[in-house]
Image (tube, rainbow, N blue to C red):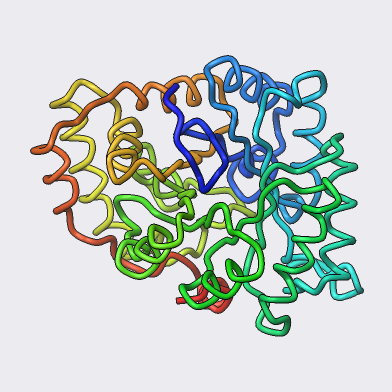
Amino acid sequence: MKHIKLGSLEVPRIGLGAMGMSHGLTGAGTDDAESIRTVHRAIDLGVTLIDTAEIYGPYINETLLGRALRGRRDQVVLATKFGLIDHAGAGVWNLNSSPANIRASVEGSLKRLGTDHIDLYYQHRVDPNTPIEETAGAVAELVAEGKVRHFGLSEAGPDTIRRAHGVHPVTAVQSEYSLWTRGVESRVLPVLRELGIGLVPFAPLGHGFLTGAVRDENDFEEGDFRRGNPRFTGENFRRNLALADAVQAIAAEVGATPAQVAIAWLLAQGDDIAPIPGTKRVARVEENTAADALDLGSEVLARLSALPAAAGDTHTEAGLAMLER
């Protein structure tokens, strides 16, 4: 597995998103044994950037990773996130990135993950009620104490990134980025490259759509966030099938899977980008990892880049309200 730098942090250029093992997707939480095997297989393949968050479950995904990493913690770069649970009383899906709340969050995460430090600690969503300087300062204190090694932001805009970086170096920004979600290219990536900050794209496979396996909007169980997501419903769904079919056709030409093509396209966008495709299955982590060796060539890359934009917003209105757009 080739490695890249996110700021000063060296990571494999393909990581593993653990959310779907426990939260948010059809089948989540139904086979912890397979999820643990998937984590172990990922590490064996060199996929050692592992991503979770306290909100996933909530809490149970971190607990699962704590079990999976027992005896192997030192082999991975472990990332988790704070800020979507208000530990002062409001509870889950309530923004709170105050210093006191970060303290409560980090202690819980360390305990559940079975570790004495977090390698990359992200603010999950920007809290409009807490100045980012206060949030960055609180994380800087955790870095000084050795509980956190690196500071990250998720779905933050350029001004927030600059202000946070001015208080404590931001190692990475996590944002949705894929062949069907490309807004970061013009708005965020230039700032990251100016400041020497890495990009960690989540949902590099379009929440599964770009694999070609999603063919019916009724396939998702209750609790799967894709039910009701604008891109996965109605006319948007039918229009987006054409985009998935185009990726599948190109994959057939180059002798790869659609997932491998989508990941390889992302890898070709820069040596400061480390996507974290999510899966809970060993076979999928093996498939995704093979994208590391796939060279698409300039002509295929250009054709992929020229594909039409996806139809529909990436989130519901409630979800969009938490993004800095």
- Residue at left offset 58%, top offset 43%: 26
Foreground residue among 16 and 119: 119
Q: Quadrant of the N terminus?
A: top left
User: As drawn, which residue projects farthest toward the bottom?
Assistant: 129
Residue drawn at (59%, 34%) of the image: 49
Q: Could you say where residue 127 lies in the image, as x and y percent from the top left?
A: 67, 76
Q: Tally the numbered discs.
A: 0
In the foreground, 163 or 243? 163
Residue 17 x, y percent position in the rendering: 57, 40
- On screen, 15 above or below 166? above
Query: Farthest top residue?
Result: 44
Identify whether 106 is placed above or below 5: below
**Image quarter of residue 268:** top left
Residue at 90% in and 42% down: 111
Viewport quadrant of the C terminus: bottom left
Q: Is residue 71 left or right of residue 36?
A: right
Residue sitting nearer the eye, 185 or 256? 185
**Where on the picture, by quarter, is residue 34?**
top right
Residue 44 coordinates in the image, percent (x, y): 58, 15
Which quadrant would residue 105 be assigned to in this image? bottom right
> For this view, does 298 lie left or right of residue 26?
left
Image spot of residue 174 (x, y percent):
52, 55
